[in-house]
């Protein structure tokens, strides 16, 4: 997951390959609660690991359920099975509506004393209709802030009050279907002596989510009947029965971003369509009907159980005018697809967007306009006119409102025909449902290498290149190439193979370097099966690296390996010839220096901290000798590129040096 302040997406051109989607948030949290209310242990497979499931798991633990996270997407939940949950308890539920609403209903019907709260936005999301329905029954629930909103207090300290179950429970269905879902999940707890009836007041929105609820209740032994989605009957004698094992289907709403990417950029130039794994046409989730909307816009879609394949059909996409009540979450993706359509797209019946993670109608309108689109909005609709010409697109920094779906759907703007980058602010917000969304996108998106930004940081030994480059990469969410480590590895491999590092052995050394079995993984470096991270960091290894790097054939042999690091979303590369030879067209080149005295002192400190003794004067002599060799060799000598910016960091802290490089980079961005 990217936890950077922002993530810049380079312009993307195509999509291909396959993507495995994470589990559905809606199914995950429903299953967790049902398992918690059941007798026995339920093994939940392919559970979504995200912010919203995290708060649910923590809440269930606090309530006394057994929660064992076995790894690999498996969680074992041992339910209460009729026991009272631990009380009193304070539950923090973040911004997870799928935890706040059903837990409120379940805890109100179980008795005990609870406080349920969330982040500030959760306290702006209405829950009054659910609270009213529970109060009708006789439950004692207080809103601790504004009436009708969390935080809530359930106050059944002296036990559950007598409940009025003889009359139908009336709940509004036109604000959020989660109120009805909450009642449906919880009322089987009290449907013992008699049927319990729920009547929906007003039109029921997001009916597909109620369909998921009913399907999952059935898996846990509760057979709810309904009359035309307005009257629901929970039969007397209902008892939650764990199915033992249950598999969470992948998230159909998350599929929408890849369906859109496929419709816009897959299957071009004879390539195969984009394959989406984990959710298919047999899905129980309503958002699978996004497929129909994408097809209406021109996508070519094939699918089966647990898979979809999507490619571009019509291009430009076809504008649509659609009632989106059946796909409220995935419909946001259509608003960005509309930028690539042949006319105005109008999305209707989306009033529920206004009470989601943010006011999504306002948010989408504002961010689409930043890209240059003409957008109109109404209380429950949005219309988006595409940009007439590629030149009308603007590079934009997309504010994401702590809303995962805003972040994910605007990533699709990176496929713009103008070749502009898109900045996604606070990319971490995707953690709510799809923590590795951007990694998944980068794994299937392609763009010509020259469009992937590279920042080069070259300079002499111990100037701080590696430290600064790694931190810049971290701040920008870019990959990091420590090219010196490759020469160090080549030298170590030569020593281990018994090949002296001398000009006469240049062909053998080059052959060795060309097939170097090196892997860079999680900050460690492996040579074949051996972790050589520390072995290549000695002063001797540095000197050997300097010697092997003077051989032109060895340098040539390592070029492809270095170029391979230029991957989405970008690269920060440190070395001696990054800006002059390997990435000569890089958009930012920095030549980082510090005085020899300062560098020797830094190296001394570095070695001492590792328990290696050395004298400053020896170190200074060594590093000056190394620099002299590196700068005087004929092949790719150490020198500043003509267009490099010079940074002498002798008097700067690491943070100051990093800030300077990032500031130079920011100054070159179009946002
Ligand atoms: N601005 C700075 N202020 C203080 N210490 C620094 C600064 N920059 C780097 N250092 C420290 O100097 C030491 C050497 O830095 P680093 O290893 O990043 O240099 P390098 O140029 O990559 O060296 P080499 O070329 O030998 O790999 C490290 O211990 C690092 O923490
Ligand atoms: N791009 C590069 C990177 C490194 N080298 C050589 C020269 C250095 O002395 C040696 C070790 O590099 P370090 O890990 O200290 O950065 O590798 C080079 O020639 N070109």
Image (cartoon, rainbow, N blue to C red):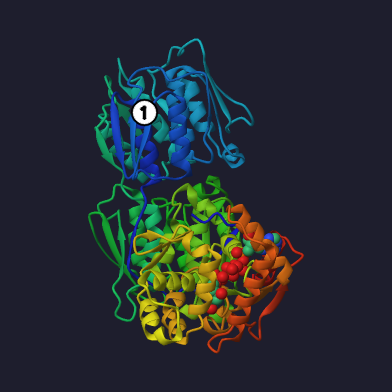
Q: Quadrant of ligand 2?
A: bottom right
Apparent side of residue 242 relative to residue 488 in the rendered image (left or right) = left
Question: Of residues 36 and 663, which is closer to you in this image?
Answer: 663
Task: Name the residue at 66% across, 57% down.
Answer: 605
Reply above or below: 70 against 81: below
Classed neighbour count for the residue bearing mark 1: other residues with Cα under 10 Å, few (<14), some (14–19), many (≥20): many
Residue lying furthest left in this view? 304
Reply above or below: 639 against 659: below
Task: Name the residue at 28% across, 20% down.
Answer: 236
Quarter where residue 638 is shown: bottom right
Question: Of residues 604 and 94, which is closer to you in this image?
Answer: 604
Residue 74, given in percent of the width and then of the height, sits at 33, 41
Residue to which mark 1 is pinned: 36
Q: How many marks?
A: 1
Question: Of residues 422 and 159, which is closer to you in this image?
Answer: 422
Task: Name the residue at 46% across, 33% down.
Answer: 58
Reply above or below: 103 against 327: above
Residue lying furthest right in this view? 651
């Amino acid at each position: 997951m990217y936890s950077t302040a922002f993530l810049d997406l380079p312009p993307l051109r195509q999509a291909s390959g396959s993507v495995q989607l994470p589990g559905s948030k809606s199914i995950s949290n429903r299953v967790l609660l049902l398992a918690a209310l059941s007798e026995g242990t339920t093994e939940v497979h392919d559970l979504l690991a995200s912010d919203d499931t995290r708060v649910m798991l923590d809440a269930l633990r606090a309530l006394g359920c057994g929660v064992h996270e076995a790894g690999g997407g498996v969680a074992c939940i041992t339910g209460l099975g009729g026991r009272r949950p631990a009380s009193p308890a304070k539950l923090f539920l973040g911004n997870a509506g799928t935890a706040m609403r059903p837990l409120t209903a379940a805890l109100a019907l179980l008795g005990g004393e609870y406080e349920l709260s969330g982040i500030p936005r959760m306290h702006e999301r209405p829950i009054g209709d659910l609270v009213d329905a529970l109060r009708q029954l006789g439950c004692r629930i207080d809103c601790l802030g504004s009436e009708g909103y969390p935080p809530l207090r359930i106050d059944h300290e002296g036990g559950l009050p007598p409940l009025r179950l003889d009359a139908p429970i009336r709940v509004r269905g036109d604000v959020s279907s989660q109120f009805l879902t909450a009642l449906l999940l919880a009322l089987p707890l009290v449907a013992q002596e008699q049927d319990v009836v729920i009547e929906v007041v007003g039109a029921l929105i997001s009916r597909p989510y109620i369909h998921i609820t009913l399907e999952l209740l059935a898996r846990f032994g509760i057979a709810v009947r309904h009359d035309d989605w307005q009257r629901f009957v929970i039969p007397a004698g209902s008892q939650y029965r764990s199915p033992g094992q249950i598999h969470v289907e992948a998230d159909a709403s998350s599929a929408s971003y890849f369906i859109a990417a496929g419709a816009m950029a897959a299957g071009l130039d004879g390539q195969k369509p984009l394959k989406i794994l984990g959710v298919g046409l047999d899905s129980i989730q309503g958002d699978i009907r996004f497929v129909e909307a994408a097809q209406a816009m021109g996508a070519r879609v094939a699918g089966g159980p647990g898979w979809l394949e999507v490619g571009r059909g019509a291009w430009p996409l076809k504008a649509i005018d659609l009632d989106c009540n059946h796909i409220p979450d995935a419909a946001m993706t259509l608003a960005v697809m509309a930028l690539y359509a042949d006319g105005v797209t109008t999305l209707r019946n989306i009033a529920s967007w206004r009470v989601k993670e943010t006011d999504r109608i306002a948010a989408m309108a504002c961010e689409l306009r930043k890209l240059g689109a003409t957008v109109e909005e109404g209380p429950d609709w949005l219309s988006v006119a595409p940009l007439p010409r590629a030149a009308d697109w603007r590079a934009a920094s997309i504010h994401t409102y702590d809303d995962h779906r805003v972040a994910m759907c605007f990533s699709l703007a990176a496929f713009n025909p103008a070749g502009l980058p898109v900045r996604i602010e606070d990319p971490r917000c995707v953690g709510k449902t799809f923590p590795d969304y951007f990694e998944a996108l980068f794994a299937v998106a392609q763009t010509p290498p020259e469009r992937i930004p590279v920042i080069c940081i070259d300079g002499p030994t111990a100037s701080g290149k590696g430290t600064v480059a790694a931190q810049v990469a971290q701040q920008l969410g870019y990959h990091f190439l420590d090219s010196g480590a490759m020469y160090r590895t080549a030298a170590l491999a030569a020593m281990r193979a018994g090949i002296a590092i001398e000009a006469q052995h240049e062909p053998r050394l080059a052959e060795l370097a060309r097939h170097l079995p090196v892997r860079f993984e999680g900050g460690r470096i492996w040579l074949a099966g051996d972790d050589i991270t520390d072995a290549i960091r000695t002063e001797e290894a540095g000197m050997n690296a300097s010697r092997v790097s003077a051989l032109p054939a060895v340098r040539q042999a390592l070029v492809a390996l270095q170029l391979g690091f230029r991957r989405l979303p970008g690269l920060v590369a440190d070395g001696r010839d990054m800006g002059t030879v390997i990435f000569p067209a890089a958009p930012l080149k920095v030549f980082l220096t510090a005085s020899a005295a300062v560098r020797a002192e830094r190296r001394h400190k570095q070695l001492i901290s590792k328990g290696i003794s050395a004298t400053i004067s020896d170190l200074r002599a060594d590093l000056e000798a190394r620099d002299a060799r590196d700068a005087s060799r004929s092949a790719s000598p150490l020198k500043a590129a003509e267009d490099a910016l010079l940074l002498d960091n002798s008097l700067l802290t690491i943070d100051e040096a990093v800030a300077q490089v990032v500031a130079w980079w920011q100054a070159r961005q179009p946002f």
